[in-house]
Image (spheres, helix red, strand yellow):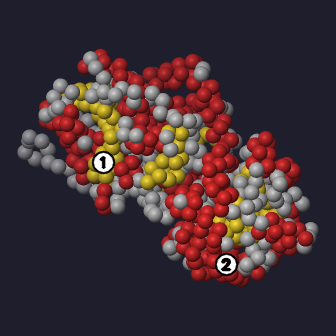
Amino acid sequence: MNTETSTGRFGRFGGRYVPETLVPALMELEAAYMAARADPTFDAEVARVLREFVGRPTTLTPARRLTEAWGGANVWLKREDLAHTGAHKINNTVGQVLLAKRMGKKRIIAETGAGQHGVATATACALFGLPCEVYMGALDVERQALNVFRMRALGAVVRPVESGSRTLKDAMNEAMRTWVSQVSDTHYVIGSAAGPHPYPSVVRDFQSIIGKELRTQAMAAFGQLPDAIVACVGGGSNAIGVLHPFIGDASVRLIGVEAGGHGLDSGQHGASLTLGTEGVLHGSRSLVLQDADGQIQEAHSISAGLDYPGVGPELAHLAKIGRMEVRTATDDEALASFYEVARMEGILPALETSHAFARGRELARELGAGKYLVINCSGRGDKDVATISARGVPPAVGVKA
Amino acid sequence: MSGEIAKAFARAKARGEGALVAYGMAGDPDLARSVDVFTAMVEGGADIIEVGVAFSDPIADGPVIQGASERALKAGSTLKRVLDEVVPEVHRRCPETPLVIMTYVNVIMAMGEERFAKLARERGVSGAILPDLPPEESEALRATFDAAGVDLIPLCAPTTPRARAEAIAKDGRGFVYCVSVAGVTGMRAELPPDLSQRLDLVRKASPVPVVAGFGISSAEQARTLSAHADGVVVGSALVRAAHSDGPQAVKALCADIKRGLKR
Ligand SMILES: Cc1ncc(COP(=O)(O)O)c(C=O)c1O
């Protein structure tokens, strides 16, 4: 179902709030994307790469022990953590880098928070032979050493950003500044369903493969559409990707989980759908964390991928019209879920994903027995081991240490 | 619409000079001392003052103005305080000089578009420049500003196709701000060779004066451009001078660039 209310707008949200220098490039991108979409060979090429290289379709896994422990709906997991590079981010970067090649662009830039999008962009650039520069907040460069290494190993240049809060939002500012200076030969691969039009639509379309596969897999696995689907929300690309194909299915509850950080009343969180107000950040009008004077506030989350004070415009719209339910999970709840999932299902989920799991138990109970709950596993937790292990690991299960 | 901007360009022209549009960051180093910086610009010969209002995420700005934004925010600068404490005082000291607010659209939205336009006009603001508000997004805001008598000054970029540039110019308010380089604010040793052609084209289409801005820091550059534009904007060079050497340096730099603008 189309939620675009007019070109580039989702209700009051969306648009193209960027320096005039970039507007022609955004128009060019929009036209090139529409032409690519109308060309079946483009879709076929994207599909081929996703199959041969990314490992799609990713599986739909029953979470039998969690189902039993939670005592409610049947819990199933859509396994984006099994995609190459370990998260859903690769679905978008493969599509966008192929598009950039089609447009004759000579180089790629990207921003990254946790480093997952940076790794996915560097990977697509290596695969298709384009030079790649990734802007990353200096603080995140320190926190995410593993992903910094991966990007460099893949041949990308990582540029630490020292301005502002030295995190994702500043990396995105810097990538935009660089793009303004090099717009004629450079494509900027935005990592979430955010930014100026047409990015929110482009990223959503490339990520919708998740939800499309899920439709087919759900019918095969349990003979119906899921009763509810839950995904974590940073900028919102994994959420819109898994949820979008179900917007028109009134029987399917759609739930997004934001970073509650240290708690909603602590002032340190990433809950822009829950507590944000209307504003303009990084080229689109959406819900943002800001003070009364319109200065953007720093977000906080234990997971670098949810540590963002904005959210994509389409999710803001879906939340406002009530089609998507919004909940939050704190840092501590996400950490507890990380170990619960690890020990009950043999999966180390990303800290971002752990937020979705953290609301799983109550959702399973709300739905009740006989219903089907799908949790989108947006990525795997390898990148987070330093953050998590620094807090100490709980004792082993069932054996004397 | 405000007549002050047109008058300022006309005065400069009558003196045989291109106009100097001087940018400073309100609140850098603090609100009171930035008033002295703006006053020094006018003493040095600036014809129009651009009052920068800091934003946390200034995507159109290079390192010099980014740094000034961070300092201004630390010093407690907000749009409300700039309108209450900086604009009226600059207006009192330099009553002839039109003041133009330069900030990002989110800062205006947070105050409320109508409230801003009304308050700005009351305090003596003639226009506004919002570098992240291209024509497609500016219609409603421009109508609000028109009604209050505040000119929403449009920007035109080196990447803007010809027909679009002409359309932007035709519908200009106050003046048309021709961005000289594809990039962010900041000083440049060299300006693009086709800039003069671009300025001629925009000027032919525009009913209001046309200025070149971004990257301009020397009297020499000002001299070259003033054959093709009604004036120049100088930002980063003045912000840097204010930060490292204070108001006297700002006054001297303005005077120097004004010499370059003599025809
Ligand atoms: C594994 C994982 N999940 C989720 C996110 C959040 O991004 P989005 O909300 O765009 O899916 C990230 C971002 O880095 C991520 O790496």
**Does the residue at mark 2 contact the one at mark 1 (Cβ under 8 Å)?**
no
Q: Nearer the viewer, mark 2 or mark 1?
A: 2
Q: Amino acid at mark 1?
A: Thr
Q: Which residue is denoted by mark 2 in the rendering?
A: B90
The C terminus of chain B: image quadrant: bottom right
- Report which quarter residue A187 is drawn in: top right
Q: How far apart, in angstroms, are the residues tagged by discs 2 and 1?
A: 47 Å
Decide if residue A350 is in sight here.
no
Image coordinates of residue B104 in percent, x first then y, are: 59, 58
Q: Is residue B181 above or below residue A49?
A: below
Q: Amino acid at mark 2?
A: Val
B61 or A2: nearer the viewer = A2
Q: Which mark is residue A328?
A: 1
Left or right of B256, for residue B215: left
Q: Residue at x 60, y 25 (%)?
A: A36
A341 or A295: nearer the viewer = A295
Image coordinates of residue A50 in percent, x first then y, are: 46, 25
Chain under disc 1: A
